[in-house]
Amino acid sequence: MAVLSGYTVIEMAGLGPCPMAGMLLADMGAEVIRVERSAQRDPLYARDMSARGKKSIVLNLKHEQGREALLALGQRADVLLEGYRPGVAEKLGIGPEVCRQRNPGLVYGRMTGWGQSGPLALSAGHDANYIALTGALHAIGRPGQKPVLPLNLVGDFGGGTMFLVAGVLAALLERQVSGQGQVVDAAMVDGTANLMWMCHSFSAGGHWDAADRGVNLLDGGAFFYDTYETSDGKFIALAPIEPQFYAELVQRAGLDPDTFSGQKQYERESWADNAIAFAEIFRSRTRDQWCELLEQTDACFAPVLSVEEAPSHPHHRARKTYCEVDGFQQPAPAPRFSRTPSSIRHGQHTPGEDTVQVLSAAGFTPDQIRLLREQGAVV
C-alpha cells in the first residue's frame, strides 16, 4: 500500500507543471488516468518520463459522447487536474461546476501561469514570463549583466507543480471533514511570489539589495556562496554561510587564515577581491581533487555535476535517488515514506492503451465502448 492508494486522479494531458503533479501523485500510489487529445504524441515528448505510472485514455472532448465519458470518469474520481487557459474547460463542458454537480466531493485542480483572474489571466505565457513578474528573474544573474534563466524550475515546477500538489492534498484532507470537494486555483505567479519570501524578508531587514543582482548573500555576490572553475574546466559549488562551516573550508582547503579570516567573512567591501582570489585558488586543482579534499566535510562543498553525471555519484547510488524505467535513467519517487513507500508501477503507456480498461471499470459495457469508438468519441 502506498500513501495515496485508493485515490483516483484524472489528468487532462498538457505540458510541464500539470503532468509533473500527476506523476508525483501516481508515484504516491494514486490511480492516475491521463486523458489525451490524440493517439499521436508530439515527438518532443516521445520519452515523457512524467507519464510513468499513469493509465492513458484518448477522448474526443469536442464530441458530446466523449465529454460524457469524461464526466462519467469524474463521478468516481477524487481529483481532476487541468492546465487549460481560464474558460477553456468551461467551453468544453467539463468545467468545475459541471464536474462537481456529478461529484460534489471532487477536488478540481487548475494549473495556470497567471491565475484564473486578473488582467493577464487570458494572455499566453511561459515560465520566464511568470518569474519575471515576481522579481525572481530579476534577482538571478551577475551584476551589470542581464538576468539568467534558471531553466524552467522556478515557475513551472517550484511555483507551479508543488503548489498545485500541496493544494490538492490539502483539499483532500479538508474533504474528510466537510465531505465536499473544491476548486484549487494554482497559479505560477502566486507560487513563485511565495518562493521569494526569504528575499522579501532580507530586503525588509535591510540585508538585501533588491535593485541589483549578484551582489547579495545568496545570489553569487558573496565569494563564499558561489561556483568556481577547476583546473580541468569543470566546476564546484561552495556554500559555507555559517562561520563554523566557513572556518572548516579555510582550514581544509589550506587557505591563508589571515586573508580569509572568519571575522572578515561578512565584510562586503572585500567580497570582490576575495572572489578573485578564490577563483585562482580553486583553479589550481581538478574537480576530483577538490572532491577528495572537501567532500564529506562541513565545508558545504559539492561538485557541479551534469545531468548525465549526477546518477553515478556515490551519494545518489547509496540512496537510490535515480532509477531506470523503460531503459532510461530518471529521478526516483520523492519524498520517502517510512511505512507506505512510493513506487513506479510501470513506464509510459502509449496514448489510448488503457481506454477499454478504464471505461470498463467506469461501468461502460463492451457494446457501449464499441459505439463510442465508431462515433469517434474515444480512441
Image (cartoon, rainbow, N blue to C red):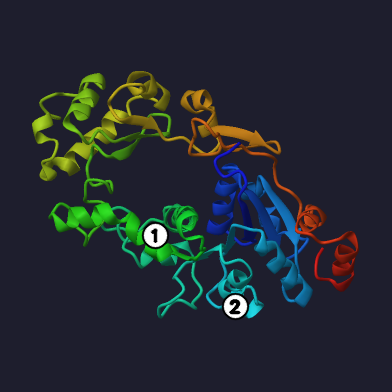
Figure quadrant of residue 256: top left
Report the side of 280 relative to 121 (left or right). Answer: left
Circle 2: residue type: Glu
Q: Residue at x 72, y 59 (%)?
A: 41
Q: Which mark is residue 145?
A: none
- The image quadrant of residue 72 is bottom right
Residue depicted at 71% across the width and 51% down the height? 55
Q: Is residue 244 above or below residue 50?
A: above
Residue 219 seen in the current view: yes
**Count of marks overlaid on the render:** 2
Element on which disc 2 rests: helix
Query: Residue 255's spot in the image, x, y percent?
Result: 20, 24
Q: Please tell me whether mark 1 sits on a helix, a strand or a loop.
A: helix
Specify which label sits upstream in the sequence, 2 or 1. Answer: 2
Task: Name the residue carrying label 1.
Answer: 191
Tell me the kind of residue under disc 1: Gly
Residue 125 in percent (x, y) is at: 49, 70
Q: Is residue 290 left or right of residue 214?
A: right
Q: Nearer the viewer, residue 41 or 32?
A: 32
Q: Position of residue 178 (x, y in %)?
A: 46, 60
Q: Quadrant of the C terminus?
A: bottom right
Q: Is residue 309 visible?
A: no
Left or right of 175 in this view: 252: left
Residue drawn at x 78%, y 73% as measured from the top left: 65
Front position in the image: 298 or 36? 36
Distance Cα–Cα, label 2 vs label 1: 24 Å
Q: Residues within 10 Å of mark 1 (few under 14, many from 20)?
A: many
Residue visible at 50% across and 28% down? 316
Residue 204 placement: quadrant: bottom left
Q: Is residue 92 or residue 301 the one in the foreground?
A: 92
The residue that disc 2 covers is 90
